[in-house]
Image (cartoon, rainbow, N blue to C red):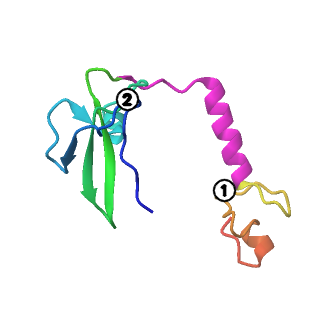
Amino acid sequence: MRKRRYRPAGESGAIPEYRKRLAPEGLATRRQLRARGLRPAGHDPVAQVRYWRHGWQVAFLYRIDLAKPVRPMTPGRWRSVHAMMRARRTCRQCGTERQYVIPSSVGCCNSCDGVPDAD
């Protein structure tokens, strides 16, 4: 399946496209923004980078000067992350919370599955 290129609403042409490592200064991908502690802040991409990785891939580029700092984690978000991880560590069969994440493909802890437990 081919990945579509970004086309802004109401425009017939695509946004500028650059090859890997040839994008102008002042533009960054989401990962590059995140590494700097920034986020796109709702702005549309201004360009894209096209690179080969098991087929042609596209990464969108955002303006660094319009990016905003990443929002900090609130206590409520931390509680929800801990609850989610506790659910992933709890065995469905015996109800025991383990020190490791139980694979969803297996669905139960090592002791319920017959594999010796590492606890």
Distance (Cα) linking label 2 and label 1: 41 Å
Q: Which residue corresponds to the image point at 35% horizontal and 41% vertical from the top-left?
A: 31
Task: Using the image, determine if residue 28 lies above or below residue 58.
Answer: above
Q: Amino acid at mark 1?
A: Gln
x and y percentages locating residue 35 in the rendered image: 33, 37
x and y percentages locating residue 25 in the rendered image: 15, 33
Q: Nearer the viewer, residue 118 or 104?
A: 104
| Side of 100 relative to 51 (left or right) | right
Residue beneath label 1, please?
Answer: 99
| Side of 42 relative to 20 (left or right) | right
Residues at circles 2 and 1 in contact by the CB criterion of under 8 Å: no
Tell me where the magenta segment starts and ends, as one range: 68-88
| Side of 22 relative to 86 (left or right) | left
Label 2 Cα neighbours within 10 Å, binned few <14 / some 14-19 / many ≥20: few
Q: Nearer the viewer, residue 61 or 101?
A: 61
- Secondary structure, mark 1, is loop
Label 1 Cα neighbours within 10 Å, binned few <14 / some 14-19 / many ≥20: few
- Secondary structure, mark 2, is loop
Residue 107's image quarter? bottom right
Task: Using the image, determine if residue 27 lies above or below residue 68.
Answer: below
Q: Amino acid at mark 2?
A: Asp
Q: Which residue corresponds to the image point at 23% horizontal and 33% vertical from the top-left?
A: 27
Q: Which residue corresponds to the image point at 31% horizontal and 20% vertical from the top-left?
A: 66
Q: Quadrant of the C terminus?
A: bottom right
Tag of residue 44 = 2
